[in-house]
Image (cartoon, rainbow, N blue to C red):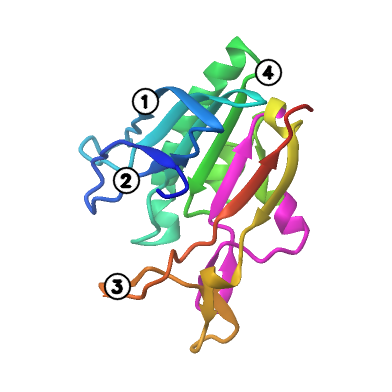
Amino acid sequence: KQAGYTFIHRESPDPRGIDVALLYNPYLFQPLHDTVLVARFDGQPTKRSRDVLVVKGYLYGVDTLHVLVCHLPSRLGGEKATSPLRRQVARTMRVYVDSLLTINPQTMVLIMGDFNDEADSPSLAVELGRESSLFNLTLLMRDQGIKGTHKHQSDWAFLDHILVSPALLERLDTVVVADPPFLLQTDKTWLGIKPFRTYHGMVWQGGYSDHLPLYLDVKSTP
């Protein structure tokens, strides 16, 4: 707040009260319109999850940018059993993005969030990957040997992703996992380090998140 940031937030029907929001610097990004995408789940008409926040705005020095912020359904109940839920949300985003790129292939689109899936999972590799012009920047970091954004026991994984359209990919400068020391803590159980989380269950830990953020720089010209 002291740095001048503000945010766009919509209440979602998530049973746990978890929503998504877009935090932005109004001196760098000017929102023009925001809405939400609501996924419908086959055979589960009453099932609801977190909505996808969609913000269209002007990125100063660049161009109009469409941002989709998501937090796909968790793996609670088993990765395989819950995969169709994440695929449906991803499919909903794909339909929306395809409509934008059909009208104008040079549209700049950025999808970001916690997918609760790795890059080779069906939600990403099939729904947002196959025959798609979107590029998952996680693949660049994984190829560089970067471990991931989330740690479960001793295993790191990329559960957080940024996908971009071709027009935005042309302006890519840097994409990294941000891991300054204040976001990390010693892992006394599984050794090494882990993200310094805010809560562990209902117990306040004083940290920031159990996921590390992704950091993206774009150039003003291709």
* SS for dot 3: loop
Real-space CA distance between mark 1 and mark 2, rounded to the nearest whole angstrom = 14 Å
Q: Note whether 186 is above or below 211 in the view shown.
A: below
Closer to the camera, 45 or 69? 69
Give the residue drawn at x 58%, y 64%: 157
Q: Which amino acid is tagged 3?
A: Gly
Badge 4: residue crowd in 10 Å (few <14, some 14–19, many ≥20): few
Closer to the camera, 219 or 191? 219
In primary-sequence order, the first of circles 4 and 2 is: 2
Give the residue drawn at x 66%, y 66%: 147
Real-space CA distance between mark 2 and mark 3, rounded to the nearest whole angstrom = 18 Å
Q: Note whether 133 is above or below 69 in the view shown.
A: above
In primary-sequence order, the first of circles 1 and 2 is: 2
User: Which range is magenta?
Assistant: 140-166
In primary-sequence order, the first of circles 4 and 1 is: 1
Real-space CA distance between mark 4 and mark 1, rounded to the nearest whole angstrom = 21 Å
Kindly identify which residue carries mark 1.
35
Kindly identify which residue carries mark 2.
19
Q: Residue 145 at x, y = what percent?
A: 75, 64
Badge 3: residue crowd in 10 Å (few <14, some 14–19, many ≥20): few
Q: Residue 175 at x, y = what percent?
A: 69, 49
Q: Residue 40 falls in which quadrant of the image?
A: top left
Residue 152 covered by magenta stretch: yes
Q: Which amino acid is tagged 1?
A: Thr
Real-space CA distance between mark 3 and mark 1, rounded to the nearest whole angstrom = 32 Å
In primary-sequence order, the first of circles 2 and 3 is: 2
Q: Which amino acid is tagged 4?
A: Gln
Kindly identify which residue carries mark 4.
106
